Image (cartoon, rainbow, N blue to C red):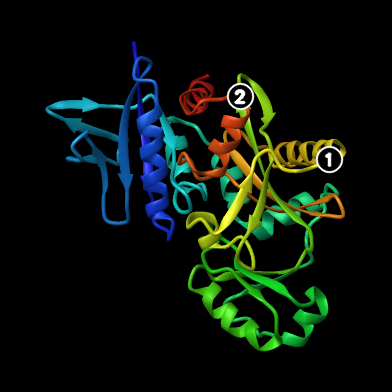
Amino acid sequence: MKKNIAIVMGGYSSEVNISIKSGNVVYNHLDTEVFNAFRVLILKDKWVALDANNKEYAIDKNDFSCVIDGTRVTFDCVFNAIHGAPGENGQLLAYFNLLKLKHTSAPFYQMALTFNKRDTLSVVKEYGIKTAISVYLNKGDLVNLDAIIAKVGLPCFVKPNNAGSSYGISKVHTKEAILPALEKAYKEDTEILIESFLEGTEVSVGVINYNGQTKVLPITEIVSENDFFDYEAKYEGKSEEITPARLSAAIEEKVVEVAKRVYHILNMSGFSRSEFILVNGDPHFLEMNTVPGLTEESILPQQAKAAGISLKNLFGNAILTALK
């Protein structure tokens, strides 16, 4: 008997439209001989299932079911395609945990941890993983610009602690630019991370559960036309994404080892895509995305393709892994 799968998309953050694109790609590529796929749009003002004509059916939050054409539909598994809150930060997954409803992401605590850049860095540093030098601020803190510059140097990055898709991030070159960058970041979050600039090659590394094993996908090298890998570079073609990355065998082996180690340190499962800067060939960890973009052009699907994994198999494997 085919399993009913809810593909949740949308969310409460600036990434809502990106999430809807990802969710629709999952919907279009799921094997219909194995799964009954339902798109579920989760927005601040409504939770609704959508039929093929985008007709809406309200979700009953008591048990995450819905009634379609007089029949109550319940779900065997949830495919999480929500970037940002509440899918990537663990909130929705804690709700599913209470309902004993299986899903394709890591447990809610791991999702909450990895969504918080500051806390993620604090954990991996204890295991000797190299990172940028950081300063943390909460909204309302006194800002000592000289002390910040003395610690992280210039240029530096100012970024929201809990946000994705490069929303709110600035690369700052002067002391005078720090305060405007903080204001921009505070529009996305009340916690701020200021990091030293790392000179080197940027790479993105997908690590997933595949056929019961932790698998590191072919590495992607990021070459941005802009000052850094910002929103335009990610989504508007202002970057070159080279998969597999142009790395020596020795450096590639080192990146694979560190990426897999970070995945295990953080007790991850499901999808992940981690960002590193290679400084003189040494991987420095930046952050982990646990609901990466899933459109055909997104980095993780590019990497899966390079590994010989179709989107049908990539998404189907995630569901079958969750069901087990």
Residue located beneath label 1 in the image: 248
Residue 174 picture location, percent across and down: 70, 84
231 vs 23: above or below: below
Q: Can you tell which quarter of the image residue 219 is in? A: top right
The foreground one among 38 and 234 is 234
Callout 2 amino acid: Tyr
Q: How far apart are marks 1 and 2 (CA)?
A: 25 Å
Up-down: is 323 above or below 182? above
- Residue 210 got which mark? 2
Q: Can the viewer see residue 106 in this picture?
A: no
Q: How dense is the environment of label 1, judged by Cα within 10 Å: few (below 14), some, or many (20 and up)?
A: few
Indicate the secondary structure of the residue bearing disc 2.
strand
Which mark is drawn over residue 172? none
Percent x, y of residue 78:
41, 32
- Sooner in the amino-acid sequence: mark 1 or mark 2: 2
Seen in the image, is 123 located left or right of residue 191?
right
Locate residue 148, reporting x and y percent: 75, 80
Q: What residue type is labelled 1?
A: Ser
